[in-house]
Image: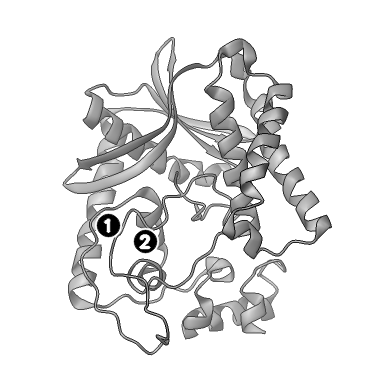
Amino acid sequence: MESTDADLGADPGQSLLSTAGLEADAGAPPASGETDSVVHIPVPPKHLSPSSASVFRQCPQRWKFRYIDRLPDPPGEAALAGTFAHRVLEDLLSLEPQDRTMDRARALATEVWSDMQDDRDFRALELDPDGVRNFKWAAWRAIEGLWDLEDPKTVELIDTETEVSVEIGGVPFIGYIDRVESTADGLVISDYKSGRAPGRRFSSDRLEQVLLYAAAFAELQGTLPARARLLYLGQRIDEAEVTAENIGEVTERLAATWEELLRRSETGEFPADPGPLCGWCAFVRHCPEGLAEVERRHQAGSLRPDAPALAEAV
């Protein structure tokens, strides 16, 4: 699964997928009693995933905080609701086509809830009864949103949660594909998204993740998928035909990111790149540039009032 990390899309923190901690394997968690003043020596990462590549491109310092310093980065409420929905949809699509009904999805949600309410990250949210009720509704809206996009009974499933670990474009790549299915025009690589769909002008950028999965799948299976899709649950489907040209483009960009990441790992220089996503950065308290950016945007009225970092900056 790829990020609860947040997939930092139009609505930060609401991706259904997460491989947090798997893709970089750089450094170790701080020992008990360590303080923020401890300097961790950067070491080259072992792998790169779409989520870790995205974090690095958005802000090298955030990447360092997460993958080298291993500062705490617990998933938020929206991300966990997405994870819950993802688990239900995975179980649903694993059933025989005739059994993929909304009633069955409700029953599966009840079963999955028993695990979720005991989850450490969920307990850390410390939700009151109203908060728990809202959490359940958010997860269920994502689940039933699948029916707004397709009839699950018609999906000819090949696999779900397909782990890919392969070298593409000279980059050791790792991740999980939500869904591989067979259609009349070939195989389709799909990824669920529970957050708000971005504006159309940003949709091609968001498709990079599934195009990378298509490249990894082709490397492993020797078969180039026909299409790559993002299913924004309850909203729309964004998709692209998989071609040698667009696979080459995303692979080259991944390779460039990898080269820069290795170079910065050698120098230890991971500068901050302040921007709108500072409002949702879990590490903002450790970042003077990020705090200043949050304050600036808050004063200008350009930061959403629900941005978690506001509590740190004001």
Q: Amino acid at mark 1?
A: Thr
Of residues 295 and 261, the one nearer the viewer is 261
- Indicate how the structure is coloured in the image: one colour
Q: Position of residue 140 (x, y in %)?
A: 72, 38
> What's the residue at 56%, 13% (across, down)?
96
35, above or below 214, in the image: below
> Does residue 290 lie above or below 206 as drawn?
below
Looking at the rendered image, the quarter that the C terminus falls into is: bottom right
Contact, mark 1 vs mark 2 (Cβ under 8 Å): yes
Picture layout, residue 100 above or below residue 238? above
Residue 224 lies, in percent from the top left, at 28, 24
Compared to 309, does 248 lie above or below?
above
- Name the residue that disc number 1 marks: 257
Crowd rating for badge 2 (residues with CA inside 10 Å; few <14, some 14–19, many 20+): some
Give me the residue at 62% from left, 10% from top: 98
Q: Please name the residue that numbered disc 2 is placed on.
A: 57
- Whether residue 234 can be seen here: no
| Residue at the extreme right | 130
* Whole-percent x, y for residue 136 in the image: 74, 45
User: Which percent across, then down, holds residue 111?
Assistant: 66, 35
As shown in the figure, which amino acid type bears the numbered disc 2?
A: Arg
**Picture mark count:** 2
Q: Nearer the viewer, residue 72 or 7?
A: 72
Residue 293 sits in quarter: bottom right
